[in-house]
Image (cartoon, rainbow, N blue to C red):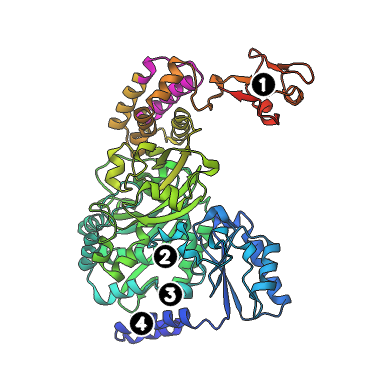
Amino acid sequence: MTVEQLKKIAAERADLIKVRRIIRSEAEKLSKNTGYRKQVLVCGGTGCTSSHSLKVIEQLEKSLKELNIDDVLIVKTGCFGLCALGPIMIVYPEGAFYSQMTPEHAKTVAEKHLVKGGEIVKELLYSGTVHSDGSVIPFAEIPFYKHQMRIALRNCGVIAAEDIREAIAAGDYEALAKVLTEMTPEEVIAEVKASGLRGRGGAGFPTGLKWQFTREAKGEKKYVCCNADEGDPGAFMDRSVLEGDPHTVLEAMAIAGYAVGADEGYIYVRAEYPIAVQRLDIAIKQARELGLLGKNIFGTGFNFDIHIRLGAGAFVCGEETALMASIEGKRGEPRPRPPFSAQCGVFQKPTVLNNVETWANISPIIMKGSKWFASIGTEKSKGTKVFALGGEICNVGLVEVPMGTKLSTIVYEIGGGLPNGRQFKAAQTGGPSGGCIPAKYIDIEMDFDNLVSIGSMMGSGGLIVMGDRTCMVDIAKFYLEFTADESCGKCTPCRVGTKRMLEILTRITEGKGEPADLEKIKEIAEHMKSSSLCALGQSAPNPILSTMAHFGDEYEAHIYEKRCPAGVCKSLLSYYIDPDKCKGCTLCARNCPVGAISGAVKSPHEIDASKCIKCGQCMANCKFNAIYKK
């Protein structure tokens, strides 16, 4: 679709159904007739670029030029999801899945596979895509992908995110054309409500209902906002959508603008996401150039434009009122509610705010219908959920599964289990606002209500897996350190409460805890949950309360026995040398920085506990596994 075509349609006020036909025909043309013998898709997301995927692309371009190959297209895409294997490169039409690529590997693939008559370089493929007999498995059929259902991530790793033509070919902006040519604002809201879509930012509020409140609010000027201030430790869902398919967010925001009566929108994205910011900027400029944003979109008289606002990384700005204050150029602090943002949001005007993943579901709902979307998931949690899978897991990466998928499926089928045969102990969902899921709930169906019922929450989608060597008291302390540091300080319960709880947890992990400390934590937690100004303070105690509920024996061991069962808390550890295993090689003594180890050559050594600083150098240097800690 060219600029001239769109301008002509707008100028002539032609039959608006023609707009959709042009979009569809152009999409089919671009997707089916590429004119290239092969296409090489290389991940250009943050994860793979940090592993030098751009150098892989440079080498591919250089090699193709040297080999005089001009019928192979190189496409820099967004995230494929399997981040643990990056940089990732997929060659079509074979679907050959090359992993952990280097420039040298890229040169080999060009010389052996991309030449005419070439063959797949099997030794460079991801091992999971190769049968024992050497035959290649389509990557979509390996466990990591076959259990997934990609809706929000449908175009990530599929299109060149910086080319609007590829976005259109993949279906972007057809939903906007449908809405503007066939549906009333009320019908759009009704469709979103019927889909059962709930906000993916953490609270799970019904999206259609939020839109309805904003439309019904009084006032001529209204706004649409996107929360891309993804602050949870280990979370990268929203970033990956923006890097892989920014146009799906722009389109959805325009649809919401039409539905609620807004003509302007803001995307609030953290400045620490430079690739996402760059691709958003490119996408907005391209959409404006094609008339998909701006004045008189599709010649319908509907105006809508989008602006980017950069956040400075304050976790509290993920809260909607703090985010809107930051957009206005004010200090990012929450305010009391009501009034809610639907009545009084950014610049004190009615505002609809959703996060990136929520927006990424809008276009498929419009095109495929609310019944289709509502058929996926569980009774009260419809559709899919994107999780950033991290921690002690083999397949670190980004996954999207139907709501209600069992945690065991995510951990063992998709995630590949824990490395080195470690046993699953817990999973943390919801980041600093969430809670821990113990091993006894490994088969829980992941949806909003089930997680709340066991003291956790969905949150934005961070899913951190922990093995049997994890200290749950230390984990609670880690998350509390984060929330204490990120508290804006505006309200006393959060500002003081997080500090006091952190002091107590620190004492416990240092072996100075007392039985009364557990009751003190619960008392402070209740005050914070009931009286903090925003969700940061209200939910800050969640990791502590959930670990106390499910792993109370570990807290008791720290307090009563002055012992860390997982062997993590240094102050509670002691190092020992097994005389039956010690060969007297003296490596431990020579590497001890404080001279705490003594013994003769070829004789068992000993550690003086009064001198030991518990640095672990002795254990790290022992070649005979003779040193242990408890």
Structural distance between the alpha carbons of marks 3 and 4: 18 Å
Q: CA distance from mark 2 to mark 3?
A: 13 Å
Q: Is residue 516 magenta?
A: yes
Closer to the eye: label 4 or 2 = 2
Q: Position of residue 411 (x, y in %)?
A: 43, 47
Dot 1: few (<14), some (14–19), or many (≥20) neighbours within 10 Å?
Answer: few
Q: Nearer the viewer, mark 3 or mark 1?
A: 1
First reached walking from the N terminus: tag 2 or tag 3: 2
Report the residue marked by disc 2. Answer: 154
- What amino acid type is highlighted by mark number 4? Ala
Q: Are marks 3 and 1 in contact (CB under 8 Å)?
A: no
Residue at image position (31%, 58%) is: 383
* Residue type beneath disc 1: Asp
Q: CA distance from mark 4 to mark 2?
A: 30 Å
Above/below status of 338 relative to 582: below
The earlier-in-sequence mark between 2 and 1 is 2
Residue that carries the numbered disc 4 in the rendered image: 10
Q: Circle 1 sits on which residue?
A: 580
SS under mark 2: loop
- According to the picture, the residue beneath numbered tag 3 turns out to be 168
Of all residues, the one furthest to the top in this rendering is 610
Where in the figure is residue 268, as x and y percent of width and height?
43, 53
Quadrant containing the N terminus in the rendered view: bottom left
First of labels 4, 2 by sequence position: 4
Position of residue 46 relative to residue 319, above or below, is below
